[in-house]
Image: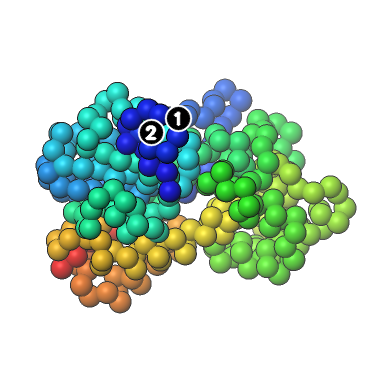
Amino acid sequence: MEIFSGKKSGGGIIGGGHGYERKTQTQTQSAVHIPVLLKEAMDALNIRRGNIYVDGTLGGGGFSEAILKKLDGEGFLVGIDRDFSAVKNVSSKFETEFNTKNFKLFHSNFSKIDEVIKTAGFTNIDGVVLDLGISSIQLESKRGFSFTFNNESSIEGEEMIDVEANIDMRMDAGDENGLTAYDVVNGYPEQEIADIIYKYGDEKFSRRIAKSIIEYRKKNKPIETPSELAVIVRKAVYKGYGKFKRFKTDPATKTFMALRIFVNEEYDSLSKFLGKLDGVLKKDGRAVIISFHSGEDRIVKNFLKNNLNFKLLNKKPIVPTEAEVENNPRSRSAKLRAFYRD
């Protein structure tokens, strides 16, 4: 576990979505990540000066920055991200904007929240926020998270701008021994691929997609780039519908999301995190979780149903306004659930 406290050194201590964004030939993605439901998350956390908060998905630092501004020099922020580059980038930014005595950033997984806050010098906290989506920065990381979509183009992809990268999809690029999406699509048997796409992507054409992947593997070289995989999936989905159909989101979106969730064990991390909340949240401490997929939201709902010592702040999940969706399309499937420890 590496700690970034804002102090520069050669190593050691030196120092926050789902949805794939569209890109056309006249528009490219920005590396600036726009936090989803930021105001709503801050309202739910009810930030108080002097308190201790955790941003378990540091990303581009949007939530952490908002928390530190509200703390106004009093209190502490613990930031966590499994992507080393995210932690390093946010650390460089924060060390010029905030007093380093008010934050520590950790290269770790939010499922280890208990270990992280102990390393930071605390036994419990007043609030925590998770944004379970992938950040725009990761979409541009050349790890195969992203692919391009033009609803008017052919399913072959000739008219599309390609995001050339290996199909990696590991959020922690430094985990050299970790499973990659390349390993799955080029090595797993048809039934396992179908199960992954169905379970983690809610994709009704999972069997057809898996069959197409296997057929491609037999006839061609290994599937190496996002564009190759996206075209295979699109063909299978279009064939499933029986005719050309316009889509609001790329037909390959669910498959890419499923592979990413599986490779990074995201459901398992969320379940482990929730299981540790009772031990790390103070009485009346608050948790805010923003999910982008029904599977994640289901895990949170089931946890709250089976843990009566946590109470909902809102009976129904909070969703983005029409204005936010228009300004930030990746927010369209977001759901925010906020609760507190009774």
Query: For this rendering, which residue is in front, 125 or 245?
Result: 125
Q: CA distance from mark 1 to mark 2?
A: 7 Å
Q: Residue at x 38, y 37 (%)?
A: 13
- Give the x, y percent position of residue 318: 28, 54
Question: Is residue 53 shown to the viewer in this render?
Answer: yes
- Give the x, y percent position of residue 91: 36, 32
- Give the x, y percent position of residue 296: 42, 61
Q: Residue at x 56, y 35 (%)?
A: 141
Q: Residue at x 35, y 57 (%)?
A: 115
Question: Is residue 314 shown to the viewer in this render?
Answer: no
Look at label 2 and name its amino acid: Ile
- Give the x, y percent position of residue 292: 42, 53
Judge whether 285 appears above or below 32 on screen: below
Picture disc at residue 14 = 2
**Quarter location, residue 289:** bottom left
Query: For this rendering, which residue is in front, 270 or 256?
Result: 270
Image color mode: rainbow
**Quarter location, residue 74:** top left
Query: For this rendering, which residue is in front, 130 or 330?
Result: 130
Assess whether mark 2 and mark 1 are in contact (beta carbons under 8 angstroms). Answer: yes
